[in-house]
């Protein structure tokens, strides 16, 4: 009996250690919930609702600066973020693409530095139906394109299905102006994938898209079919879901966005927060 109790204690200790974030940064900031994250070099740009930004030095784990995006405002949910290719002047960072998420679901292109940001371009869609509702925008730096992710839910009798539309567009150049509208002629590829979870952020590495999904663990979400926390991995060559990484035992907080640092997949979470390192290979 004593051996069993000792074994259980050891297992609980291992689980507790495993569930600790790599960087214990707070999720809520100035009363606004955590949302997007983009990593470049050793700097993680953490976004909160309305377009608030904190920069975390991943070498030390400390917040090095705090500021508002050029697109800061009530309508900007800052749902996901990713770095692009072009730079403004001699800035060490490429421009960052931020998903508005709320209608009209635009993409804000920000020239970010270590201490501030300026809105340099806004991208919108001239589409209809599900193709006009881009909750997430994410740049494929390797392919020099930009993807949008939309969600449409429908039910048939006892069956409940959630399809997510993925559209691939050409990546507008900064020289095209401060306001760019993408239409059907700019679409390079379009397809649906199926998973039931609530969509959060997005990141792309090589030929795969990583989608954090799900909700925090609380009584309000207990019976929701879309609450399960996971990372959906989409193969951009086959246009299919490659696999799903279970996050239920890794964090009880809401997965918000992810990105890569030195080949490691980092996940930014809401509520009590934390940046977690997620095994993905």
Image (cartoon, rainbow, N blue to C red):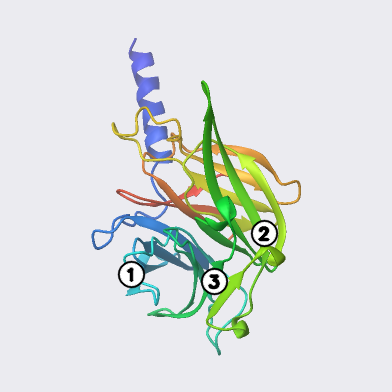
Crowd band around label 2 with a 10 angstrom C-alpha radius: few (<14), some (14–19), many (20+): many
Give the percent coordinates (x, y) of residue 254.
Answer: 39, 45
Distance from disc 3 to disc 1, alpha carbons, whole Å, reads 17 Å
Q: Is residue 24 above or below residue 228?
A: below
Distance from disc 1 to disc 2, alpha carbons, whole Å, reads 27 Å
Residue sitting at 71 percent across and 66 percent down? Answer: 185
Q: Secondary structure at mark 3?
A: strand
- The reply to whether the C-beta atoms of the residues labelled 1 and 2 are less than 8 Å apart is no
The earlier-in-sequence mark between 1 and 2 is 1
**Quarter containing the N terminus:** top left
Residue sitting at 40 percent across and 63 percent down? Answer: 46
Residue under label 1, please give it. Answer: 73
Crowd band around label 3 with a 10 angstrom C-alpha radius: few (<14), some (14–19), many (20+): many
Q: Is residue 117 above or below residue 62?
A: below
Q: Is residue 204 above or below residue 3?
A: below
The earlier-in-sequence mark between 3 and 1 is 1
Q: Is residue 99 above or below residue 108?
A: above
Give the percent coordinates (x, y) of residue 84.
Answer: 59, 71
Residue sitting at 55 percent across and 52 percent down? Answer: 265
Find the residue positioned furthest to the front.
Answer: 128
**Quarter containing the C terminus:** top right
Residue under label 3, please give it. Answer: 123
Give the percent coordinates (x, y) of residue 7.
Answer: 40, 21
Q: Is residue 263 among what the camera can see? A: no
- The reply to whether the C-beta atoms of the residues labelled 3 and 2 are less than 8 Å apart is no
Q: Nearer the viewer, residue 165 or 126?
A: 126
Q: Secondary structure at mark 1?
A: loop
Q: Secondary structure at mark 2?
A: strand
Marker disc for residue 168: 2
Find the residue positioned furthest to the right.
Answer: 238
């Amino acid at each position: 009996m004593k051996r069993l109790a000792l074994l259980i204690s050891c297992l609980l200790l291992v689980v507790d250690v495993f569930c600790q974030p790599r960087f214990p940064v707070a999720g809520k900031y100035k009363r606004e919930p955590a949302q997007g994250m983009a990593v470049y070099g050793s700097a993680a740009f953490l976004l909160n609702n309305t377009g608030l930004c904190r920069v975390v030095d991943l070498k030390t784990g400390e917040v090095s600066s705090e500021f508002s995006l050029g697109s800061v405002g009530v309508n900007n949910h800052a749902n996901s973020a990713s770095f692009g290719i072009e730079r403004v002047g001699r800035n060490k960072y490429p421009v960052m693409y931020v998903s508005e998420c709320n209608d009209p679901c635009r993409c804000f292109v920000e020239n970010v530095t270590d201490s501030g940001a300026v809105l340099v371009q806004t991208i919108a869609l001239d589409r209809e139906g599900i193709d006009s509702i881009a909750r997430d925008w994410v740049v494929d730096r390797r392919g020099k394109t930009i993807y949008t992710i939309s969600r449409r839910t429908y039910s048939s009798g006892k069956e409940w299905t959630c399809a997510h539309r993925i559209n691939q567009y050409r990546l507008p150049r900064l020289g095209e102006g401060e306001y760019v509208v993408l239409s059907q002629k700019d679409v390079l590829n379009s397809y649906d994938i199926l998973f039931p979870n609530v969509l959060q952020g997005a990141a792309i590495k090589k030929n795969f898209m990583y989608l954090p999904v799900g909700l925090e663990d609380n009584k309000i979400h207990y019976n929701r079919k879309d609450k399960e926390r996971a990372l959906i991995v989409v193969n951009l060559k086959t246009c299919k879901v490659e696999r799903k990484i279970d996050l239920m035992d890794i964090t009880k907080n809401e997965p918000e966005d992810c990105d890569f640092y030195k080949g490691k997949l980092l996940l930014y979470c809401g509520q009590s927060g934390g940046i977690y390192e997620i095994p993905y290979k």
